[in-house]
Image (spheres, rainbow, N blue to C red):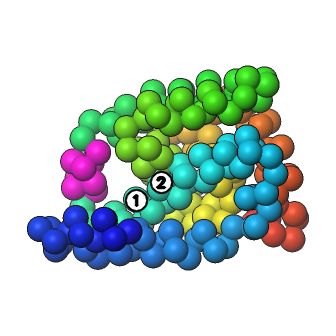
Amino acid sequence: MALDVLATLHRADYLSAVLAHEAFHYHSIRMLPCSLWRGDPEERLLTLLITSIQQEGIADHVACLFMREEELREMFEKHVERGDEYVRGLDRSLSKVYEGHGVDVLVEFMRGVPFGGHVVGYYMAKAIAEALGQEELALTARNPFRFLKKYSEAAEALGLTPLSETSLKLLEAYEVKHFKPSHHSPG
């Protein structure tokens, strides 16, 4: 966060957007169940990578409330325009994890995506907000697996690339493990 705020020294108009982005992280991480960070190392890494995509995507979407979307797009250059391509790569990686190839395939995917989880996460958050509404996007803040599942639903409605059934099965298995019905948001 300190580096993000320091980066605004020459662009004070971005300060409110950066603070909104970081405030989202600060509060939303505390809403996630502790069980997400338990389990074997591969499971924790998968959870961390999926949570990173969800967290950065929603936080960047929140930041857009305080700055023009064009400015955010300039920061990400042309990478957001390739969002569908990145979703296909994420889907291939999640499918391979489900098929038993290990979480390293997801790590490799994340290494190859510019700006880490920011670009693909923002692309997904924008699709959810556009197709399903801001409230539905807000509900995904408590559940990173739901975020990806809701993206898939939004993608179908918008004619974008949804996640495959194989990837959705992996997300469902993790969601069931970490989110009890009493902690599970509706839908």
Disc 1 residue crowd, few under 14, some 14–19, many 20+, Cα 10 Å: many
Local SS, label 1: helix
Q: Position of residue 24 (x, y in %)?
A: 49, 71
Q: Nearer the viewer, residue 6 or 79?
A: 6
**Residue type (three-letter) at the residue carrying disc 1:** Asp
In the image, taking residue 169 as reference, residue 126 lies left or right, namely left
Task: Give the vertical position of 179 relative to 116 (above or below).
Answer: below
**In-image side of 168 versus 147 (left or right):** right
Determine which residue is flagged by label 1.
60
Q: Work out which residue is located at the far front of the displayed protein and give it.
A: 41
Counting the numbered discs, the total is: 2
CB atoms of marks 1 and 2 within 8 Å: yes
* Residue 170, position as x, y percentages in the image: 77, 37
Asked whether residue 78 is drawn in magenta, I would say no
For the question of whether residue 79 can be seen, the reply is yes
Q: Which residue is mark 2?
A: 57
Q: Main secondary structure of the magenta part?
A: helix
Give the magenta range.
69-76
Q: Nearer the viewer, residue 117 or 37?
A: 37
Q: Which quadrant holds the C terminus?
A: bottom right
Residue 14 visible in the shown view = no
- As measured in the structure, the alpha-carbon distance from the residue carrying label 1 to the one carrying label 2 is 5 Å
Quarter of the figure with residue 136: bottom right
Q: Is residue 74 left or right of residue 148?
A: left
Give the image location of residue 8, x and y in percent: 20, 69
Residue 105 sits above or below residue 126 on the image: above
Q: Amino acid at mark 2?
A: Gly
Residue 52 lies, in percent from the top left, at 55, 52
